[in-house]
Amino acid sequence: MDGSADKAVEVVNTHAASPFLLVCDHASNRFPERYGNLGLGEAERISHAAWDPGALAVSLALSGLLDATLVHSTISRLIIDCNRALDAPDLICTQSETVQIPANANLDDTERSFRIAAYYQPFHDAVAAVVGRRKAQGRETILVCLHSFTPVYFGVSRPWPIGLIHGHDARFAAAVADALKARMSDLELGWNQPYSAADGVTLTLERHGDANGLASVMIELRNDELRTPAAVSAWAERLASALIAARESVDAREPAGLATREG
């Protein structure tokens, strides 16, 4: 690690033995010093608008349980959202739910290009480097993207404690769903909830998973499920067990890229 205050990405457990590669796009609510507070108050800076609360904690716990490499962002998605296409209107958002981001209004091309080069591209380069290295070594890789979501969005309650989202190939996500339900019979699991690929939220999953023929899944945990260390540990253990079981599914381990997207 270079110790730069503006470093955009961190790679944890680089030489892990696990076939799982964990990615957490919205791990941090940090604003690089050059941006001050983006015109936001403290409440907005610690809210779900700025990051996915609890997502990094559960990602780190899962990395330890699985002995898996984790790649995570170290800057707020309000600077730039690493899980959006470069032409997405919310790549650098000016409003997140009801939160206005004054400093992101009317950005010129120079600032936009700077954020892409300084924060967005290094993140994706880091993920691509890990995938490429594993591929060169002939290692199996299963991509797991981890997020959290707010229990209420624009006044609408979201009942699912966990949602699973897939890209072009749904099979590994379906295997994870089956494994979770086998362990938690009363679980209200959201399939392609609270978002789906149609909402433009699967850029990382598709760019690094589907494009490389990898089995993959995007996991969304409701952030009120992650408020204590004990709760984080419990979900990490459930996910570790479900991911291991899903990997053992014959269908999930077939080459990706053959199934049609559903939903």
Image: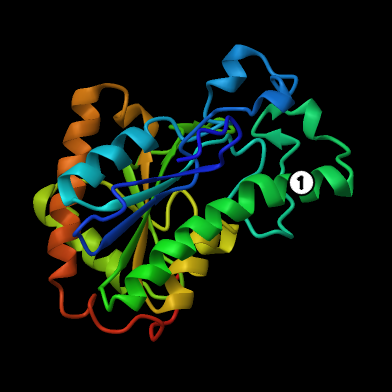
- With 139 as the anchor, is 200 left or right in this view? right
Query: Which x, y percent locates residue 147?
Result: 42, 44
Residue found at x 30% / y 73%: 171
Farthest-out residue, front: 2
Query: Which x, y percent locates residue 193?
Result: 43, 52
Count of labels shown?
1
Residue found at x 58% / y 52%: 122
Which of the 4 image quadrants contains residue 248?
bottom left
Residue found at x 28% / y 48%: 13
Q: Can you see residue 256?
A: yes
Which of the 4 image quadrants contains residue 143?
bottom left
- With 252 as the anchor, is 260 left or right in this view? right
Q: Residues within 10 Å of mark 1 (few under 14, many from 20)?
A: few
How did the renderer colour the structure? rainbow
- With 36 as the anchor, is 149 left or right in this view? left
- With 205 as the anchor, is 94 left or right in this view? right
Q: Can you see residue 91?
A: no
Which of the 4 image quadrants contains residue 221?
top left
Residue type indicated by callout 1: Phe
Q: Which residue is mark 1?
A: 114
Query: Which x, y percent locates residue 95?
Result: 72, 34
Find numbered disc 1 in the image and state the secondary structure of the residue it sits on.
helix
Query: Which x, y percent locates residue 214?
Result: 36, 74
Quadrant where the N terminus is found in the figure? top left
Along the viewing direction, whichever of 12 and 93 lies nearer the viewer: 12
Residue found at x 60% / y 13%: 42
Work out whether 211 lies above or below 188: below
